[in-house]
Each structure stands twice: as C-alpha cells, then as structure tokens.
Image: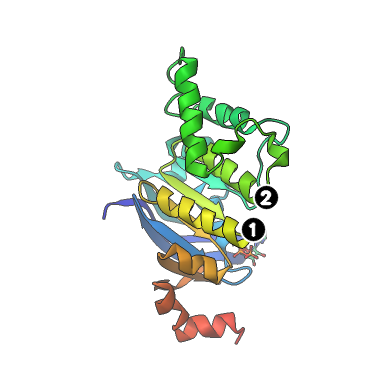
Amino acid sequence: MSTLLEVSGVTVTFDGFRAINNLSFQIGKAEMRAVIGPNGAGKTTFMDIITGKTKPDEGRILWGDRSENLLKMTEAQIANAGVGRKFQRPTVFEAQTVTENLRMALKRPRSPFSVLRHRPDAQEKADIEALAEEIGLKDHLEKQSGYLSHGQKQWLEIGMLLAQDPQLLLVDEPAAGMTAPEREHTTDLLVRTAKTRAVVVVEHDMEFVRRLNCKVTVLHEGSVLAEGSLDHVTSNQDVIDVYLGR
Ligand SMILES: Nc1ncnc2c1ncn2[C@@H]1O[C@H](COP(=O)(O)OP(=O)(O)OP(=O)(O)O)[C@@H](O)[C@H]1O
C-alpha cells in the first residue's frame, strides 16, 4: 500500500507542556483510520498539525507521491494539496439550499471543476446531483439547509468537502448527536469515501468505530499507545488501564 501521509517523531509543546510527544503515524492512499483516545490525548492537536494550523517543534511530515515536506506548507497550501477537514459542528450556509451550498463548494479553487471557466450549467447540475446522491440528499436539493436534520447537515458538509476532491479527509466525531439510522448512513458514506481516499475519523463512540471496521490508532498523552484492529487495541492492557483511568 502506498503511503499518502507520513508523520515521524512529531512533538508539539504548549508553554512547556508536551501535547504531542514523539508521535509517528502513517496512512495509505485509500485507507480508513479511526483515531481514539481519552480527553486531552492530543487528537485535536494532531489534526491541527496535519492541516498546518499548529506547527510542531520537532519531527517530519511527508505528503503525497513526491514526499513533499508538509511542514513547509501554509494552511492554504495544505488545503489546496488535498487535505479536507470536517469539524464536529456542521458549518453549512443555513440560509442557502442544498444545491446552493454544493454549487459554492464546486466553485472553490480546489475543485477539479473550477478550472473550467465556462462550465455548462448542465454539467454543474449533473455534478451537484451526483454529490447529492452520494451523500443521500438527492430528494432535498431545493430545501433550505437550516431545515435539514443535524445528520443531513453533516452529510451536506461532507458533500461540500468531497466537491473539493480531497486526498485526505479528517473528520472529527461525525456520529456525535446523530440518531441510529443517521449513524448508519454516515458509516456507509465514510466507508465508500475511503475506497478512493484516505479518511481519518476521530471518534469517541466505540460502536461507531467498530462499524467502520478499520485499523485503529489509540493516542494517549500525545503518543501512539496502540495500533491495530479494534479488538486488538481494546484487549491491550495499557489501553484498558488508560480508559479505566488507572
Ligand atoms: N493552545 C493550547 N495551549 C495550551 N495547551 C493546549 C492547547 N491546545 C491543547 N492543549 C493541551 O494539549 C493537550 C491535548 O489537547 P487536545 O485538544 O489535542 O486533546 P484531545 O484528544 O483532542 O481532547 P478531547 O477529546 O477532549 O477533545 C490537552 O492537555 C490540552 O489541554
């Protein structure tokens, strides 16, 4: 499996406190990975490093086929290189319809379609419909986004990120606040997405992680405590001790 992102020996210190401590992590081009860990383990900081929001004190991060030095790139360059991030709370434009939200996302610079200056309306419509179909909102295209359910807003935002054709999608607690059927739909969407892209899901809900059926990385005190299948990591004594607070 070819590697898309390789993080080696990364350390982040806030006022002398090591939030990330000699962390190493790799993900392939079409791979799903769940990142779990107790509060304060460093999950958010880890994502902030990959998106360029936080610069580490030490370590190396290589990106893509040409093994580019990600640490030399700005946040905007990293986003343009194909890293998309979905925050926990949906940030769709509530006053706009689903179609309008997807149209705006297709017009952003990263979109593979934005280079075609005179893009026919018919093509744009087809792209919007394909995205809506993918995220399960085909029947809600003209609905104002503020009237969507919480789950539907989350899917719309994932659709807006997919419009940008990311190579790596970072997703923070996608299942939070969702009903059981919404969680199932979200699992299916993320699993399909990871067939062609790398997807990192930070999640607390173990049942959701189990359904993702992927390799799991457990963070603790800014380092990788264990890695492997969910059954493998949850039978690891160090992981059990950390989760039980011993
Ligand atoms: N800007 C900052 N300044 C100082 N300390 C910080 C800063 N950001 C994070 N930390 C500390 O770094 C550690 C890791 O935080 P981080 O938010 O990455 O953990 P997390 O795993 O995402 O936690 P949670 O599951 O609660 O969201 C915590 O102890 C946190 O208090």
User: Of label 2 and label 1, which has the lower sequence position?
Assistant: 2
Distance between the alpha carbons at the discs numbered 2 and 1: 7 Å
Where is residue 72, by image quadrant?
A: top left
Kindly identify the residue that appears in the image at 27 percent across and 52 percent down: 2
Residue contact between numbered discs 2 and 1, judged by CB atoms under 8 Å: yes
Q: Percent position (x, y) of residue 170?
A: 51, 51
Kindly identify the residue that appears in the image at 63 percent across and 69 percent down: 39
Q: Which quarter of the figure is the C terminus placed in?
A: bottom right
Q: Amino acid at mark 2?
A: His
Q: Residues within 10 Å of mark 1 (few under 14, many from 20)?
A: some
- Image quarter for ligand 1: bottom right
Considering the numbered disc 2 on the image, is that residue within a helix, a strand or a loop?
Answer: helix
Kindly identify the residue that appears in the image at 58 percent across and 42 percent down: 157
Q: Which residue is mark 2?
A: 150
Residue 178: give its label: 1
Q: Is residue 109 above or below residue 235?
A: above
Residue 119: give its label: none
Q: Percent position (x, y) of residue 98?
A: 62, 33
Q: Percent position (x, y) of residue 43?
A: 56, 62
The furthest residue to the top: 118
- Depth check: give the residue in front, 192 or 197: 192
Left or right of 61: which side holds 35?
right
Q: Percent position (x, y) of residue 126?
A: 46, 26
Left or right of 61: which side holds 93?
right
Q: Residues within 10 Å of mark 2 (few under 14, many from 20)?
A: some
Q: Which quarter of the figure is the N terminus placed in?
A: bottom left
Kindly identify the residue that appears in the image at 63 percent across and 51 percent down: 151
Q: Is residue 163 above or below residue 107?
A: below
Left or right of 82: which side holds 148?
right
Considering the numbered disc 1 on the image, is that residue within a helix, a strand or a loop?
Answer: loop
The furthest residue to the front: 139
Q: Amino acid at mark 1?
A: Met
